Amino acid sequence: MLKAKTTPIFWEALIIVFVIIGVMSASIIKFSAPPHIPILIIVILLIAYGLLKKVPFQQLQQGMVDGAQPGLAAVFIFFLIGILISSWLISGTIPTLIYYGFSIVSASFFFAIVFIITCIIGITIGSSLTTVATAGVAFISIASALDLSLALTAGAIVSGAFFGDKMSPLSDTTNLASSIVGIDLFEHIKNMAWTTVPAFILSIIAYAILSPKHTTVSLTNVETFQAALLETNLVHWYALLPLVLLVILSIKKVPALVTLAIGSIFGIALSFLHDPLSLTAILDILFNGYVPNTTNEAVNALLHRGGIASMFFTITLVLLALSMGGLLFTLGIIQSIFAKLEASLTTVRSVITGTAITGIGVNTLIGEQYLAILLTGEAFKEQYKKVGLAPKNLARAIEDSGTVVNPLVPWSVCGIFITDILGVSTINYFPFAFFCLLGPVLTVFFAWSGKTLSKI
């Protein structure tokens, strides 16, 4: 953890937090500004505040560098996801998923079906972002062709993907949460079921109710869309093999970077079976994305995506957000608020509620999922012991308020990525990401009811 170079009083730190939230909210929601701008403004304001507090500029600069450093691993993953999408387009994996998706997914209960399928894929591969970038892209395309709400579809995709991220033994966040508090991975997953299962059931019911009936949806374009996909010569049964390989590598616990790289290479190799491209063309597609050239504009819009260049918006924003987080720690703002919270946590209810608030707060301020889990877990270990709660309660609470909240924050790592990949803003899908919204609500509900809690 970054060391504070100054110690602001609690109310001073709280005012700064409110200013940050205000600048973010006003810029993004009211003025529709790209989140880069308000974050850069906040960074400048924090530097000015640090200089007023007599913190040397070199230390402030180092705080920004140290804050951004944990995001480098994510940056490389984003590069490879951009390449993976391009390779899965030329291999036909994504077009084939979309084509068969049209065949098996009906308008009735559409959102519930999307939620269930993304849950299955998410828990199988243990990666929310990979689920969004593959199955999520396919479902958004299907929803567009069926004239269904893209915001609702994105909400169902995000909910299903983060159900998998939360409950899969292959998930980084699930392993991280259990290791921080020192409990068995499968004990942690089993204990999370107390809040996860109700959230899952409530989400399915909500998506089923909101799904349209056949009679309310226009299906006239679906067959035309499928025919246009066939004309691309990208729809083949073997094109689904990269997805099978991705699942196998995930089960084998192959590191994400290696898995994405192997999946991309395999996708490129498969493309030679139906459309041999020159090395120059392949390298261009991997960087700039796939550019289809069909007579159907809808299909062109659908398949025009991927490439390293498509990740630049996400990567620059991630680095800016983490640099801002580094400044918040260097200036002691986060530590000051944590210290005040710890002093007021003396009951089971207050400790778990404080955990949820902290997880949401770190996600909102810093926008980084792993930091929300790490910082909250480290900050509350002793408080759980003091009130007689078993560590697995802490692990569950930080997942309910850390893992699933990140995609709901417009300037977070996950929120930025999802908006970029699906083309639906965080603000638009936020109200429909039911599973993610229910996480912190249920964890606080059980805290106040006293149910499902384990004592030491």
Image (cartoon, rainbow, N blue to C red):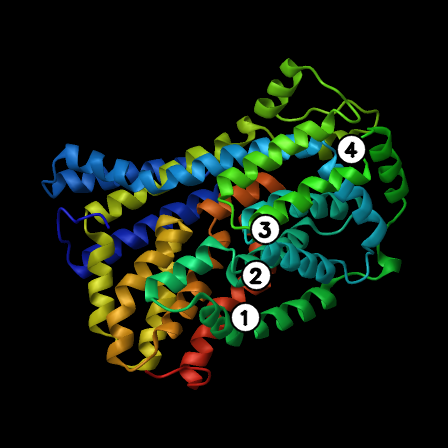
Residue 97: % across, % down: 75, 44
Asked whether the beta carbons under mark 1 and mark 2 sit within 8 Å of each other, the answer is: yes
Of badges 3 and 4, nearer the viewer stands: 4
Task: Check residue 163 in the rendering and tell me which mark sits there, or answer none.
Answer: 2
Asked whether the beta carbons under mark 1 and mark 4 sit within 8 Å of each other, the answer is: no
Asked whether the beta carbons under mark 3 and mark 4 sit within 8 Å of each other, the answer is: no
Viewer-nearest residue: 130 or 47: 130
Task: Check residue 299 in the rendering and tell me which mark sits there, or answer none.
Answer: 4
Asked whether the beta carbons under mark 3 and mark 1 sit within 8 Å of each other, the answer is: no
Which residue lies under the disc numbered 3?
A: 428
Q: Residue 59, located in which quarter of the rendered image?
A: top left
Q: CA distance from mark 1 to mark 4?
A: 37 Å
Which residue lies under the disc numbered 1?
A: 196
Residue 425 in sight in this render: no
- Secondary structure beneath dot 4 equals helix
Q: CA distance from mark 3 to mark 2?
A: 20 Å
- Secondary structure beneath dot 3 equals helix
Task: Inspect the image, locate mark 2, and give the three-letter code of the amino acid beneath it.
Answer: Phe
In this rendering, position of residue 194 left or right of residue 332? right
Q: CA distance from mark 2 to mark 4?
A: 30 Å
- Secondary structure beneath dot 2 equals helix
Of badges 1 and 4, nearer the viewer stands: 1
Task: Inspect the image, locate mark 4, and give the three-letter code of the amino acid beneath it.
Answer: Val
The disc, 3 or 1, on the residue closer to the chain's N-terminal end is 1
The disc, 3 or 4, on the residue closer to the chain's N-terminal end is 4
Q: Is residue 63 above or below residue 174?
A: above
Q: CA distance from mark 3 to mark 1?
A: 24 Å
In this rendering, position of residue 390 left or right of residue 135? left
